[in-house]
């Protein structure tokens, strides 16, 4: 087996941080703006239906996680979100040298920050806040822009790891055939 080689898309440490923070902060800003607009303009009892029924703007305040799981564990979800934020910024991003992985971690950062902010500052109280959700597709949970960031991050990570076969450092994870020959085998008659 030969050693893994760097693949296209590798960038320096500063570029990684620039990508992560730009995507993260822009995504976070969009999430917070859309939540503000949803709270300001949507009536939970009369949700607008758009795109021929494909999208409903149903405002809810979710104390749980995806699909309203863990509604009685909001403070635990807050702690998990805070730990995930630290993990992304302190462990994943410093080890990343590939722009695709940096983009994925930027999306993840946006999603974590958006929902963590809700849990920290929204009613009923600090660290028990309910997440603002307002986008609903047919036969699916109600979600928000932060949830979309987390989902797109997961898809991007899966694509990079499985389909393109590149790790966070930009090296190929595919095994290459061993092209070296055994010197003793060449000398045999």
Image: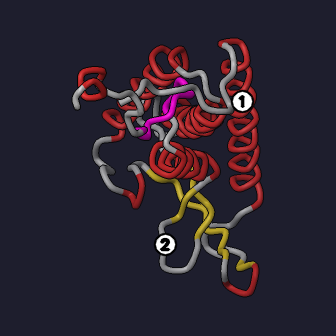
Up-down: is 19 above or below 46?
above
Query: Magenta residues: mostly which secondary structure?
Result: loop
Magenta run includes residue 79? no
Quarter in which the C terminus is drawn = top left
Residue displayed at 68% across by 15% down: 12
Q: Which residues are magenta?
A: 167-176
Residue density around tag 2, few if under 14, some if 14–19, many if 20 or more, within 10 Å: few
Quarter in which the N terminus is drawn = top left
Q: Nearer the viewer, residue 44 or 58?
A: 58
Horizontal and vertical percent position of residue 79: 36, 27
Residue displayed at 48% across by 14% down: 90
Q: How is the image coloured?
A: secondary structure
Where residue 11 sits, quadrant-wise, is: top right
Where residue 22 sits, quadrant-wise, is: top right
Q: Nearer the viewer, residue 119 or 86?
A: 86
Which of the numbered marks, if any, corresponds to residue 140? 2
Horizontal and vertical percent position of residue 162: 45, 49
**Disc 1 to disc 2: CB gap under 8 Å:** no
Up-down: is 54 above or below 169?
below
Residue density around tag 1, few if under 14, some if 14–19, many if 20 or more, within 10 Å: some
Q: How many marks?
A: 2
Horizontal and vertical percent position of residue 121: 55, 31
Where residue 51 sits, quadrant-wise, is: bottom right
Residue displayed at 40% across by 50% down: 65
Horizontal and vertical percent position of residue 30: 75, 43
Q: Nearer the viewer, residue 116 or 154?
A: 154
| Circle 1 residue | 25
Q: Dot 1 lies on which element? A: helix
User: In the rendered structure, which disc, 1 or 2, sits on the residue that comes first in sequence?
Assistant: 1
Up-down: is 51 above or below 9?
below
């Amino acid at each position: 087996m030969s050693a893994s080689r760097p693949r296209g898309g590798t960038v320096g440490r500063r570029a990684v941080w620039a990508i992560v923070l730009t995507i993260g902060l822009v995504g976070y800003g969009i999430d917070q703006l859309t939540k503000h607009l949803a709270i300001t303009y949507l009536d939970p009892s009369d949700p607008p239906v758009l795109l021929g029924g494909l999208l409903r703007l149903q405002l809810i305040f979710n104390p749980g996680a995806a699909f309203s799981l863990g509604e009685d564990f909001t403070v635990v979800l807050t702690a998990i979100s805070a730990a995930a934020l630290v993990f992304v910024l302190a462990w994943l991003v410093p080890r990343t040298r590939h722009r695709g992985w940096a983009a994925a971690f930027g999306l993840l950062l946006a999603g974590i920050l958006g929902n963590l902010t809700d849990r920290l500052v929204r009613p009923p109280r600090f660290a028990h806040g309910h997440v603002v959700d307002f986008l609903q597709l047919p036969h699916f949970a109600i979600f928000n822009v932060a949830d979309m960031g987390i989902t797109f991050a997961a898809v991007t990570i899966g694509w990079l790891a499985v389909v393109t076969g590149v790790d966070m450092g930009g090296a190929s994870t595919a095994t290459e055939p061993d092209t070296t020959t055994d010197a003793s085998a060449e000398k045999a008659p």
